[in-house]
Amino acid sequence: MSSVTVDHVPGKAHDHSHDHGHAMPHGWRRWLFATNHKDIGTMYLIFSLTMLFEGGALALLLRTELFEPGLQFFQPELFNQFTTMHGLIMVFGAVMPAFVGFANWMIPLQIGASDMAFARMNNFSFWLLPVAAILLTASFFVPGGATAAGWTLYAPLTMQMGPGMDLAIFAIHIMGASSIMGAINIVVTILNMRAPGMTLMKMPMFCWTWLITAYLLIAVMPVLAAAITMVLTDRHFGTGFFNAAAGGDPVLYQHIFWFFGHPEVYIMILPAFGIVSAIVPAFARKQLFGYASMVYATASIAILSFIVWAHHMFTTGMPVTGQLYFMYATMLISIPTGVKVFNWVATMWRGSMTFETPMLFSVGFIFVFTIGGFTGLILSMAPIDIQVHDTYYVVAHFHYVLVAGSLFALFAGAYYWMPKWTGRMYDERLGKWHFWMSMISFNVTFFPMHFLGLAGMPRRYADYAAQFTDFHAIATVGAFWFGLSQLIFVWVIIKSYSGKGEPAPAKPWEAAEGLEWTVPSPAPFHTFETPPVVK
Amino acid sequence: MKKLRGLLGSCAMLLSAVAGAQVQDMPGGPRVNQLNLTEGVTQIARDVVWLHWMMLIICLVIFVGVFGVMFYSIWAHRKSRGAKPATFHESVGVEIAWTVIPFLIVIAMALPATRTVVAMKDTSSADMTVKAVGYQWKWGYEYVDGPAAGVKFLSNLSTPRAQIENKEPKGQFYLMEVDNPLVVPVGKKIRVVTTANDVIHSWMVPDLGVKQDAIPGFLRNTWFRAEKVGEYRGQCAELCGKDHAFMPIVVKVVSEEDWAKWTAEQQKKLAALADDPNKQWTKEELIARGQNVYAAQCAACHQANGKGVAPAFPPLDGSKIVMGPQAEQIAILLKGKEGTAMQSYKQLSDVELAAVATYTRNAWGNGGKGQDPVVMPASFKAAR
């Protein structure tokens, strides 16, 4: 990104707001009828944090059962409900809405727009989420409990589930609708509402990654909706899409699901790349290396993500040519992903670095995400994949890219922009504790899972051979440690929002770039009512 | 000093006692705290181990290179050491290099992998074909050709329930032992055709380098050629419902002589079994046989006490169907019940079905008080 200079007087916007009769509403109306991108962003973030703790609690319940072999606390039916709901809640409730929350808050501020393009749709797309979350959570309490078919909801196992399955299908439909609306809003905002002079190739990387992610969402969420609708009609209306006896095919479901599922992986990681690409230059006090190649790499990853889906299905038994094609295509993804890592390292090279919490989480992200990237490359090899498919190796792999990847980047972004959101600096000491605790306990939890998987421990097992005991015990201890460490984060947020801590200046980070740092902290209710001019 | 030595001694004894009670490696299954893939007993399994080492080494080298640079930079280029930021922000040459070089590395990785993929998929010219059918929650095997052709049996978890519920200490083969292992000859190319009866299962045996999904309504195949006599263990690898963790796979690889002996024995049993339906069984014989069938086939859902698990698995104790005329129970056992987890059990023999029906009519509170307390194999034969 070329350096951005702004012709804009900070603070002016605030006085302005009263003239328009757009004064800030108060009480519950402010939130229920919210049309302000900052309020909606805040609600998204609070919602996703709540869901992170719900999903986390489920993870701890299943780790408790896995502490030692034998059935101690939960019967397998309930255990399977926990694994399924942990996955669904984390993917659709925690990670995706969190990134939309960041988009809501930051994209208008970064491109110099006054708000999101469709403010009322923005309100609707948020308020759909709590409805979906209630449906999902309530499904635990219907006869037969929540769906226990795994978050991938493979047919025909889904045919055997109780009404909890239908609730999950409705919830996913609603969350999908919410995502699509959010994505349309983001695309329109970015394409139409950039400040004069803010050309596409001057946009911050976060906006670029979200623009590409939004297109991915629009392309694949309907595919997921189609897949689960077919499950619904198979369950209740006598269709046989996935039933061989009626001329259907259970593997068809997997093809449709993973055609959504693989781009979904990138939906959850591309905005994370954007956040890290903002933070690393700010704390290295040096421009992002290879801005253009970052944009091209993001776009290549997005395009490749559509043509590699069947690498999730190597063990279903596809023809040798199919297996070879999906293996080669998958291996190619490592190239643009590698370019990104190289660019971040080159950005740090000969910079002048300091290590506040956002930078710690970003460096941690690069380091640990890359481990997940390497195991991904190893998994892309069909013969190795067949040996470790559906074992803990895969569990380790996707938690390295999703927890140490997406979640750590979300933490990095939260610390980076929290001064802008709250007007207060967060507690640096607590932030550092949060980072080191999370980093260490994350590895204690998930590193041993590589060994378990290589030794042949299948995933989604409520009970296991006694030879696996030690690594499971370590993972359980690590999981509780990791879970409790997240309470530090909640404490940091509460402190910051309740006005404790130093008041934050408009630009608390010495070398941070972008329009968001030209407005005061906390960002006033209305910003950029007159668009800034970017030179 | 003496005291200290005594203390140390008793500590050491305690430790060794604990170690003695600890689990041991499982032959043909996981070793205690195993770190890497199993070496296995097939060429494919060994190829996979080789590929994995190759990938691990390449990835480690790149990892050390990239993060060596990053951590050096973190150490040397920090503000607290007085580093002044440079201003460079792109370099076409460098950027092309770090796109092209990884591309070449990826091609180098793909070449050996391709060879293994082609070998894995080549199920042609097998010496023998076995069909593996996944059921909730057990495996069924059927010898399609060769000297054991026609032999078929079910293979259930044989770990006692008490071990799973922590009422007994866990054995060395906990959860990875079965009543009837799949028996195959050593050194022969065995083609395994998989399918499933209800939901998708996956037939995996790491030592053989095999994992193949079993898909209801479709046939898939894979193969292995075991080079060493022994028992090799695996588990179901595709989430298939409640007892997904309790349907292991054991493949017993035997020498040529043992294989001949085993097949002869099986063929004799097969011949004996064929006469069964015409025999008049006594009620006691049927109940005794039925109890075993019930424990293996029915107890997972309907429970050993016949109370079932509401709402998916209804109770048999006091059930109208079990207490009523035999025809309805026979129909359900043979055809299953649509829209529920109750599957067809027509793969069982008439004697087994009659035995289990008779057992349920006489067990628990039912006590033979309903209609038709004894069901004869001939009734099943007629109803098929």
Image (spheres, coloured by chain):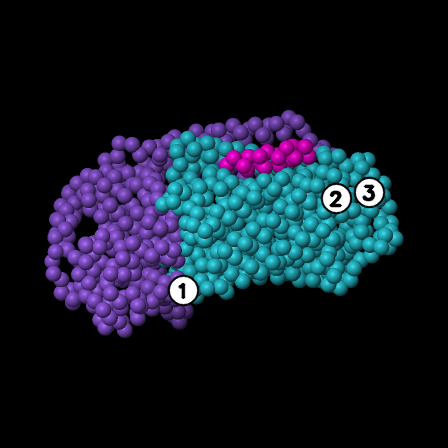
Chain colours: A cyan, B purple
Image disc number at residue B311: 1
Quarter assignment of residue A194:
top right
Q: Residue at point 29% right, 54% down?
A: B335
* Subunit ID for the residue under disc 2: A
Secondary structure under the numbered disc 3 in the rendered image: loop
Q: Is residue B233 left or right of residue A481?
A: left
Q: How many marks?
A: 3
Left or right side of B271 for A317: right
Q: Position of residue B223 (x, y in %)?
A: 31, 38
Q: Nearer the viewer, residue B290 or A196?
A: B290
Q: Earlier in the sequence, mark 2 or mark 3?
A: 2
**Which amino acid lies under the numbered mark 2 shown in the image of this protein?**
Gln
Where is residue A466 drawn, in percent x and y?
36, 57
Indicate the secondary structure of the residue bearing disc 2.
helix
Quadrant in the picture for the N terminus of chain A: top right
Residue A437 visible in the shown view: no
Label at residue A137: none
Q: Is residue B324 above or below residue B226?
A: below
Q: Residues within 10 Å of mark 2 (few under 14, many from 20)?
A: many
Give, as a single range, the part of the protein colored magenta.
A291-308
Give the quarter of the image for residue A184.
top right
Residue under the image location 40 percent in, 71 percent down: B3
Kindly identify which numbered label has been placed on residue A531. 3
Compared to A291, does B27 lie above or below? below
Q: Position of residue A488 (x, y in %)?
A: 63, 60
